[in-house]
Amino acid sequence: MLKSIRVRLTLWYLFVFGALLIVFSTYIYSSVSRDMRRRFDASILRNAQAMASYVTEFAERQNLEAGAKETVQELREGRESAAIYREGQLIASNGDDVTAAVASTRIQDAVGPDRKPAYITDPRANRRLVYMPFEFENVKYAIAMFEPLDKLEGEIAHMRNVILVGLPAVLLLAAGGGFLLARKSLQPMVVISEQAEHINATNLNERLEVAHPDDELGRLAGVFNALLSRLDTSFRVMREFMADASHELRTPLTIIHGEAQVSLAQDRAAEEYKKSLGIIRDQAKRMARIVSDMLALGRAEAGDQNLRVEELYLNDLVEECCQAAHSLAVTSHILLVCETPEDVLFLGNEELIRRMIVNLLDNAIHYTPDGGSVSVKLTGNQTSAQLVISDTGIGIPADCVGRVFDRFYRVNDPRIRPNGGSGLGLSIVKLAAESHCGSVKVVSEPNRGSTFTVALPL
Amino acid sequence: MRLLLAEDDPEIASFIARGLREHSYAVDVAVDGEQALYDADVNTYDLVILDVRLPLKDGFSVCRELRKKSFHAPILVLTALGDVEDVICGLNCGADDYLTKPFDFPVLLARLRALLRRAQQTWRNTMQVEDLMLNPLNHTATRGGQLIRLTAKEYALLELLMLHPGEILDREAIAQCVWEGHFDPFSNVIDVYMNRLRKKIDQGFENQLLHTRRGEGYILSSSPAASRN
């Protein structure tokens, strides 16, 4: 459940919104209740002031003490309690509860030298007591009054209840809204993942639908589609390679299988068996060559990280390969000329580079008729090395030059003797050069010869 | 039976041709699509075996062109291309059968026999004229229950005669069907083979089956006069 982004988003939304709401409600509650208490105090004070002015008005006509007594007596009928003090001594009151409250709360001590009104809450009777000093004809008087807090507390409690009930309700609504919002904004993702789920190796040509290509999700879908395209291409290349490879392997397999079956179908002379076994041996070699070339190609293609790189002298390697090819050239009456400078230090995979040189040399000698020549020339400077192998062979037709590096591609020419090659030789050359950040080029003219140039950065 | 084998790989062509010849088929090999079309035009074949990846013209195109020219003999496509699409394409191009490489040689032989049987509209595996029976499976003949051993060429000759009982077959037709490539029309090799065959099937039997028609050819029939009509 928590794994779903939608739920997590909703919870986060709820958490943030809830925290904000709690802070806000607490602030509202405390400020409103403080305000209400202050106004409550003000209203008691106003009553006290009204009473004070009433008492002083009375005092102008007769003595104050009598006026005070009359006033509090009137208040008693109005169900309000009050007491009047002169110099701290009670002169009038309309009930014991006021005087008892004044005594028990020691409110008179709370009045400072500036003689400002003092307020105190009597917790025992839950009421608010005010003690308001005033002066009349230089005599210090004070009025004490109280008001029950029930009504105020009731209003504050009501407000608290509204908040306590409203807050979860609002949070619940917010959660619902957040969930819907998250769902709405995540819906395109769900659609994308559902579409992507249906794409596998067999339908890589399908693409995701992009409704709004410019928004964030549209860009994501676009990136995904581009990835699919690349995947599709590499899958297709791989499938083609597999088809070609299986076809190439099937031919020698057919010959081995068929030759053996036909030979074994009846008794034969030893010579015939020898001939058949010779054919079978040659085809087995051809298969082994194809398999090892495919492996080399696969290994080189697997990437640079698997390629063991070491320092080697390119000139020594070229000369070694030329010496190895010398006997083959001599039997075909081909002049093999090898020209190398001193000390061309190169950082690369020896096996792959050797294979590249050997393949180029084998090809040059194989496609050059008797009496021709093959020249190998290595040049090097500070930044790069160049290996040029040219022959005076049959050349490559112009329309085939572009394809000779393709896997399993063979030029269709009846003059070509089958050499038992795998059709992968030049693909390996190209891959070997490219995996060392180099390149290979070919220039060819039919019946005049071909020149392969490998450039390798040092 | 004379077959055309279109196959560019010399080693594959070599063992198929050898195996087929040892089973009494006359085999011509074409190394590319154009040659296959030319050979099919010039000679008469009972069946064509076609590779697909042929130089100059691929097997499927050859197949289509042969059918367009109302070439009616069975065509068997023999190729390394084994995808369903390839098989469908091959059969839709007019081929009668499709076999993928690598293949079992006995299976190829069995399919060829099946195709030829269908082409000749026979459903039985043995052929019979009077009391002479011929079994293409093991290349043996029996007459009156007596086993007759035949060489490959003798079998091919007898098969041809038994496929056309009561019909006069001239030397040219016999050479076309039993011998491959260019047959020397002045050679008497057919007469030599016919005499050996007659010895094997007619010696010791009252009812002579194989007759020579001077200046015309040969006929396999219980009464030589009957075929005159």
Image (spheres, coloured by chain):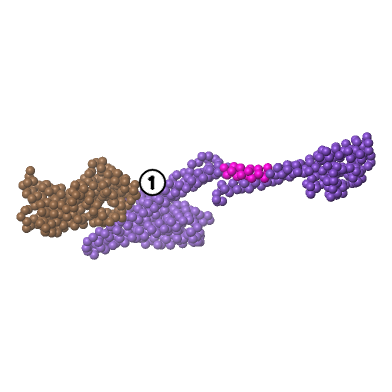
Chain colours: A purple, B brown
Relative height, residue A380 to residue A120 (above, below):
below
Badge 1 amino acid: Ala
Relative height, residue B167 to residue A357 (above, below):
above
Start and end of the magenta stretch?
A: A162-180
Residue A420 image position (x, y, % from top left): 34, 57
Q: Reply yes or no: does residue A196 show up in magenta.
A: no
Residue at 53% over, 45% down: A189
Which quadrant, please, contains the C terminus of chain B? top left
**Which one is nearer the viewer's eye here, A240 or A19?**
A19
Looking at the rendered structure, the secondary structure element under dot 1 is helix
Q: Quadrant of residue B19?
A: bottom left
Residue A235 image position (x, y, % from top left): 43, 50
**Which one is nearer the viewer's eye here, A8 or A447?**
A8
Q: Main secondary structure of the magenta part?
A: helix
Can residue A415 be seen by looking at this rendering?
no
Relative height, residue B153 to residue A99 (above, below):
below
Q: Reply yes or no: does residue A171 show up in magenta.
A: yes
Residue at 84% over, 40% down: A76
Residue A315 image position (x, y, % from top left): 47, 60
Can residue B53 be seen by looking at this rendering?
yes
Residue B41 image position (x, y, % from top left): 22, 44
Q: Image check: B70 left or right of A35?
A: left
**Which one is nearer the viewer's eye here, A121 or A308?**
A121
Q: Quadrant of residue B193?
A: bottom left
Q: Image check: A166 left or right of B8?
A: right
Label 1 neighbourhood size at 10 Å, few (<14), some (14-19), many (20+)? few
Report which residue position mark 1 lands on: A398
